[in-house]
Amino acid sequence: MNHVAGLFLLIFAAGMPVMEDLFSDPAAPIRKEMGEIDDELASLAPARLTPAVPTLGYLSGYGKSPDVSFPVDIVLRRVARLDTLMILPVAAVDEQNVCHSFQFPLRFTIELIAADGTSRMIADYSQEDYPTPGLEPQVFPCPSEFEVQSIRFTTLRLRKSPHEASKDFFMSLGEVLAFSGQWNAALNAEVRTESSSTRPVPLTWHPSFLVDGFTNYAPVELNMDRPIIRMLTRADQLTVTLDMGKQVVADELRIWPIDYSSNHSHTGSHGRGFPLKLQLEAALQADFSDAQVIYSDENFPRPNVGPLMRAVTPVKGRYLRLTARNGYKHPGDSETGIGFAELELFQQGKLLSQGITPELTNWSVTNFASQLTDGFSKTGRIRPLKNWMLQVARRAALEKRHADLSLELDSVHARQAATLRGAGIFLAALIGVFLVLFFILRYRHEKRLHRMRDDIAGDLHDEVGANISSIAGTAEILQETLPDATPKQNKLFDDIIRTARRTARQTNRLIQFLERRRMDGDLVLQMESTARQLLPDTEHQCHWHDAEVFNRLPSTIKWDLLLFFKESLHNIVKHSHATIVTVNGSASGGMLTLSVHDNGTGIPDKAETPAHLKLRARKLKGRLSVQSSPDTGTTIRLNIKIPRSSHAPSPHD
């Protein structure tokens, strides 16, 4: 007796931590953080990834060893105090049409170098691998008090070629943005590399493409409600003149193409009519008698969706004149026109041109002039480049954190499920110990062995049912004491209660079957009797073809088929609200088919096939199908293979 009492205390002590965990909710802080992330993501403008860009960036030469050391120096056009450096990985599309970063270096260092040769290290991954990045900008803060003349990116370890058969190693970088406030000081800077460490490809890879302004993220907040801005002119030349109202020093030009990508999938529709020859002049006099050319180029790629960004010579002027020639001809067009969606001029990152209506030459439709400087591209509002890239990086970090939290939440739910299982085991152990104690006490008080054993067996039989009901009641009380229970906890509680009650109902029927170990008699008659019992107030019909095949089935199959039939009717009574039920049974081609159709409300779209029907179908090694709709009701159909012993006897036998 003392040993049993000690076992009781031991089980109780072991179960206390389980019960404590049951009443806590470790998932609450995770859900709270996920909610905060969702709120912040909703406040961030969605960024449109554009894999097809005019240039890709910088590609290193191939090597047979991953360990190398070669620098890439970006010499700024003038000294700047940088606060943020961003490096964009190259985007690649795999065989599953999924975008991912392409060959970002494994190990590297980044230094800021002043005009006198002093340097500041802002990233040192010489002793550890850099985490595989996504497609978002990789952001590196800079000491704003340090005056930078050049940026040195030194590669120390390369990634292996993604082609399995290749033994080569190489790296790539997409675009480098070096911000001083809102100004990208790295735009069109000089890029110096060792000739052996680069592998240029025309219009795709070149060191200068590191700072040409083309990225996978155009800084525009999509708004497709704006009307399409069509071709501006069919003339050979378009002149745009702006009176800035005061003397300014413009140092950057951005021209947005007319993006038809939302209307036409053909890549030729991107940048339709974009001028491929540009000249920008600045003047203090309105007649441009003192004009100076601050930008002139006809050797640049045609932009697709994002803008053409170009650094210009900083010259003081009040009047700025852009001359555009040689518009890109869309495939299939009979004429060549010139057009673009937005013109922007900047000084040290500050937008100068917005709201200034330009004067246009060689353009007959003048009411669109103000739209060239209204802050909108064809697809939406244009946002400041630096802020946009920081939002892209922030969104990527939040989405990764959200995914990690989701995995953590799944783990917590798994632990909670284990806790509930432990609580069930704990309760079962207590009940078991209680039953053992009860048995021993009854045994000691009763001396007549045979009669006492019968009495104890009867009492135990009664106690099993009572204790199963007790388990259900205890679980209900326990559920009521958890007002903040998670959906997972409520589901597990409901499972405990439902299982206990169903066990109490089914025990006697199962015992009867197990005692006889067979099921004799007419299966068809028993199924019809079952239908009358379960559907007393519902019109129902049973149709049988080759009923003798059903009656020749082995006893175990008869039993499982009858239980499948009962479960089908039980679901109809419980859920369908049907007024007519039709049962059809047939045998053909070595297969036996049982179908149950009702004209009820159908199964909800998100509901699954009842688990017990699936279990019975698996035991019968049959194929289960459920067809349901609110208009036609539900049809449950089971097909099983007829055992060879159940086939009709041959007429020759």
Image (cartoon, rainbow, N blue to C red):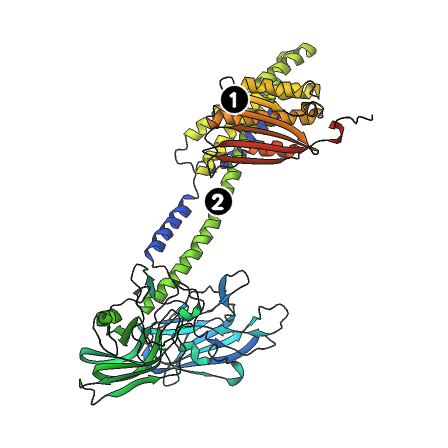
Q: Residue furthest front?
A: 334
Q: Which circle marks residue 24 in the picture?
A: none
Q: Nearer the viewer, residue 645 or 493?
A: 645
Where is mark 2, residue-wise? 412
Is residue 392 shown to the viewer in this render? yes
Q: Nearer the viewer, residue 364 or 584?
A: 364
The residue lying at 52 percent from left, 22 percent from top is 469
Amino acid at pointer 1: Ser
| Location of the C terminus (image quadrant) | top right
Q: Label 1's element?
A: helix
Q: Earlier in the sequence, mark 1 or mark 2?
A: 2
Residue 614 drawn at (x, y percent) = 59, 34
Percent across and percent down for residue 524 are 64, 21
Point 51% across, 32% down: residue: 634
Residue 544 screen position, x and y as percent: 63, 24
Residue 595 x/y as whole percent: 59, 29
Residue furthest toward the right?
653
Q: Nearer the viewer, residue 448 or 405?
A: 405
Q: Which residue is mark 1?
A: 469
Instruction: Please name the residue shown 29% across and 62% down the image.
Output: 227
Which amino acid is tagged 2? Val
Q: Is residue 590 above or below residue 135?
A: above
Asked if residue 356 is positioned above or below residue 294 in the image, the reply reads above
- Residue 441 shows up from this direction: no
In the rendered image, which quarter is residue 321 located in?
bottom left
Residue 624 appears in which quarter of the rendering? top right
Is 241 placed above or below 643 here? Answer: below
Cα distance, mark 1 to mark 2?
30 Å
